[in-house]
Image (spheres, rainbow, N blue to C red):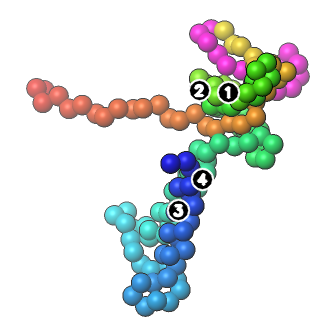
Amino acid sequence: MEIQKIISALKGENELMLIDPITGKMGIPEMLDETGRSFYDVHVAAIEALKEYGWKEIAVDGLPPIGQPLIVTIKDNLQGLPNQLRYPVYYVKDTMIDGYSWKWIFGDIANELIPSVSEVIAWKLFPEPYQGKQIIDLND
């Protein structure tokens, strides 16, 4: 399910949560989760977190934060098709041109995305790496 659909569903649930099921009156009912936060507040936090990790179109949402790893969608001007780059791409200050550019790093080599060939049209934050589950050694 795409993020926008999840956000819409959560917003719909939030509207329902504004009506107390016992009294039928407007207002956030006191339904709390295990941390003591209301379910309404949990939904609002989830919506904000999902928005942060969704796709951002440069023409609409602007440029990404400088120096953070990103997944980008490029307009491949050679083939005329969009293409996703799923390895880390960075929007960085470029001292060679006194401006900013898009770079991806392979080993020790930094490569630049050339706008006339690979125009970045959308970006999203790179997800956190998988941490794995802690394995408990029962033999210790």
List the residue tagged with mark 3. Answer: 9
- Residue range in magenta is 95-108
Query: Residue 122 shows which numbered tag?
Result: none
Q: CA distance from mark 1 to mark 2?
A: 10 Å
Tell me if label 4 and label 3 are in contact, CB under 8 Å.
no
Q: Does 80 appear above or below 5?
A: above
Q: Does 118 appear above or below 53?
A: above
Q: Secondary structure at mark 3?
A: helix
Report the amino acid beneath label 4: Gln
Q: CA distance from mark 4 to mark 2?
A: 20 Å
Quadrant of residue 110 within the rendered picture:
top right
Tell me if label 1 and label 4 are in contact, CB under 8 Å.
no
Report the amino acid beneath label 2: Arg
* Left or right for 81, reference 71: right
Q: CA distance from mark 4 to mark 3?
A: 9 Å
List the residue tagged with mark 4. Answer: 4
How many C-alpha atoms fall within 10 Å of the one at disc 3: few (<14), some, or many (≥20)?
few
Sequence-earlier tag: 4 or 2: 4
Q: Position of residue 18 (x, y in %)?
A: 52, 78
Q: Secondary structure at mark 1?
A: strand
At horizontal 17% and vertical 28% (from top left) the residue drawn is: 137
List the residue tagged with mark 2. Answer: 86
Report the amino acid beneath label 1: Asn
Sequence-earlier tag: 3 or 2: 3
